[in-house]
């Protein structure tokens, strides 16, 4: 179930940001956000970190997964999570 939720969140982010892109040099390496989302009555907390190399890492329930930004900015990834109902800070 946990991998299913993480998979849904990852796919949602990738679909939402697949067409986004920026040519701006974003100096946001090692920037992290903690996101909380209610999913099926359960509060899910994940940490999302910009690795500064075109990838970001999602840590959820002790499991870590690194994903490609696919041309999106870290801020767009966080905005996508918030569009899916998460609260990030």
Image (cartoon, grey):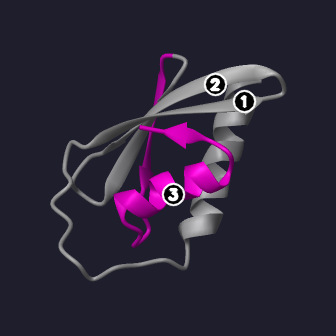
What stretch of residues is rendered in magenta?
A: 62-89
In the image, residue 24 above or below residue 34: below
Name the side, left or right, on which 3 lies relative to 49.
right
Secondary element under disc 1, as helix, strand or loop, is: strand
Q: Earlier in the sequence, mark 1 or mark 2?
A: 1
Q: Where is mark 3, residue-wise?
A: 79
Give the position of the C terminus as an image quadrant.
Answer: top left
Q: Residues within 10 Å of mark 3 (few under 14, many from 20)?
A: some
Name the side, left or right, on which 63 lies relative to 1.
left
Residue 72 placed where, x, y %? 41, 69
Q: Are marks 1 and 2 in contact (CB under 8 Å)?
A: yes
Residue 76 occupies quadrant: bottom left
Q: Residue at horizontal 75%, vertical 20%?
A: 42
Viewer-closest of 61 and 26: 26
How far apart, in angstroms, are the residues tagged by discs 2 and 3? Answer: 17 Å
How far apart, in angstroms, are the residues tagged by discs 3 and 1? Answer: 16 Å
Give the position of the N terminus as an image quadrant.
Answer: top right
In the image, residue 52 above or below residue 36: below
Q: Where is mark 2, residue-wise?
A: 44
Residue 7 occupies quadrant: top right
**Number of marks in picture:** 3
Judged from this view, the residue extending furthest toward the bottom is 23
Name the side, left or right, on which 78 lies relative to 39.
left
The image's mark for residue 28 is none
Residue 75 placed where, x, y %? 39, 59
Residue 5: in magenta span: no
Q: Residues within 10 Å of mark 2 (few under 14, many from 20)?
A: some
Q: Where is mark 1, residue-wise?
A: 38
Residue 37 placed where, x, y %? 65, 33
Q: Are marks 3 and 1 in contact (CB under 8 Å)?
A: no
Q: Residues within 10 Å of mark 1 (few under 14, many from 20)?
A: few
Residue 69 placed where, x, y %? 41, 61
């Amino acid at each position: 179930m946990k991998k299913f939720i993480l998979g849904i969140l990852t796919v949602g982010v990738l679909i939402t940001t697949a067409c986004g892109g920026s040519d701006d040099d974003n100096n946001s390496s090692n920037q992290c956000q903690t996101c909380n989302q209610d999913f099926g009555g359960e509060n899910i907390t994940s940490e999302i970190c910009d690795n500064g190399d075109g990838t970001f890492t999602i840590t959820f329930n002790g499991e870590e997964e690194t994903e490609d930004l696919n041309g999106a900015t870290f801020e767009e990834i966080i905005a996508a999570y918030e569009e899916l109902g998460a609260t990030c800070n």
